[in-house]
Amino acid sequence: MDRRHITSLVAAIAIALALYHVKNMATAHAANAALVKDSSVTLKGRVKFEGALPHPARVTMAAEPSCMKLHPSGIAAEDVVVDPSGGLENVVVYISDAVSASDAPKNEVVFEQKGCMYHPHVLAMQANQTLKIINDDPTMHNIHPLPQNNREWNKSQPPGVQPVQETFPREEVAIPIRCNVHPWMKGYIAVFKHPYFAVSGKDGAFDIKNLPPGSYTLQAWHEKFGTLTKKITVGPEGAGDLELVFKAR
Ligand SMILES: [Cu+2]
């Protein structure tokens, strides 16, 4: 083997070693990324109400015959919805620390006008995520968000037209939504720049997914009962079964 061949051989070995090193680095990096992703947990809990409940309000739709036809004997207002075990529905539960913002998910969230009520009554979404508003009723609605930290608008939506598509660019808990035609229609939309939020279901249960372990401030917002704050520590197993209790004042 002459000197030229030896030089080429040494160069080839050096390149192979370098490639091997790069490959190892990439594997280690991927493993770290997987570790960070896999160590995130689901925060689970329940929101409850304790004490004497406010008198249940009813909505009557006498002012609008087409709505009245759908609910001839009226309908229970949705401002306070508590199940027999005390579970409080429609509470926005979220991490309130300044965690870094993340891109809006590609999927849209749907807010429906059906039976002259809003479905869901309380919606939570990410900033800049697409909000699709549907009118399922045979009557015209006029959807009117009343934000403090976003742009106010209102749009008429006659029956059978295309859904309204909108976004809210800034965080806000929560934006009241009203209908300029039907004063009993009340809903709320909470907007977050991160994905760590949930709305409590019928039994008051909530879960917040993919939360990295750490110390956080958890808040719960209800349209009538205000805001609760709780400091939590999320370990590799989560934070146990959290209970957030609103008490009668
Ligand atoms: Cu309406």
Image: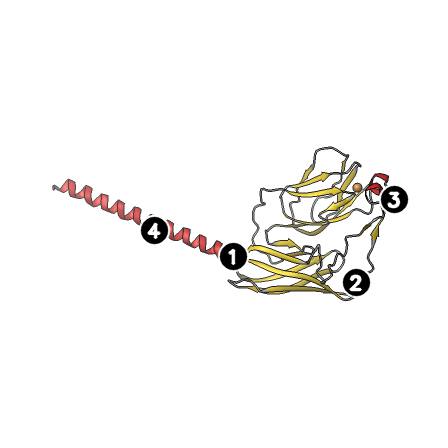
Secondary structure at numbered mark 1: loop
Q: Report, in whole angstroms, how far the alpha carbon at label 3 lies from the one at label 2.
A: 27 Å
Q: Residues within 10 Å of mark 4 (few under 14, many from 20)?
A: few
Disc marking residue 53: 2
| Residue that label 3 marks | 62
Q: Earlier in the sequence, mark 4 or mark 2?
A: 4
* Residue nearest the viewer, comparing 218 with 185: 185
Question: Could one spot residue 148 in this view of the protein?
Answer: no
Measured as percent of width and height from the top left, residue 142 is found at: 78, 39
Amino acid found under the numbered disc labelled 4? Asn
| Residue that label 1 marks | 40
* Residue nearest the viewer, comparing 150 with 133: 133
Residue depicted at x 63% and y 46%: 127
Amino acid found under the numbered disc labelled 3? Ala
Amino acid found under the numbered disc labelled 2? Leu
| Residue that label 4 marks | 24
Q: Report, in whole angstroms, how far the alpha carbon at label 2 lies from the one at label 1.
A: 37 Å
Q: Earlier in the sequence, mark 2 or mark 1?
A: 1
Secondary structure at numbered mark 2: loop
Q: Residues within 10 Å of mark 3 (few under 14, many from 20)?
A: some
Secondary structure at numbered mark 4: helix
* Contact check, label 4 and label 3, Cβ < 8 Å: no
Disc marking residue 3: none
Q: Earlier in the sequence, mark 3 or mark 2?
A: 2
**Where, quadrant-wise, is the C terminus in this rendering?**
bottom right
Q: Residues within 10 Å of mark 2 (few under 14, many from 20)?
A: some
- Disc number lying in front (4 or 2): 2
27 sits left or right of 37 in the view: left
Residue depicted at x 77% and y 54%: 79
In the rendered view, tell whether residue 244 sits above or below residue 179: below
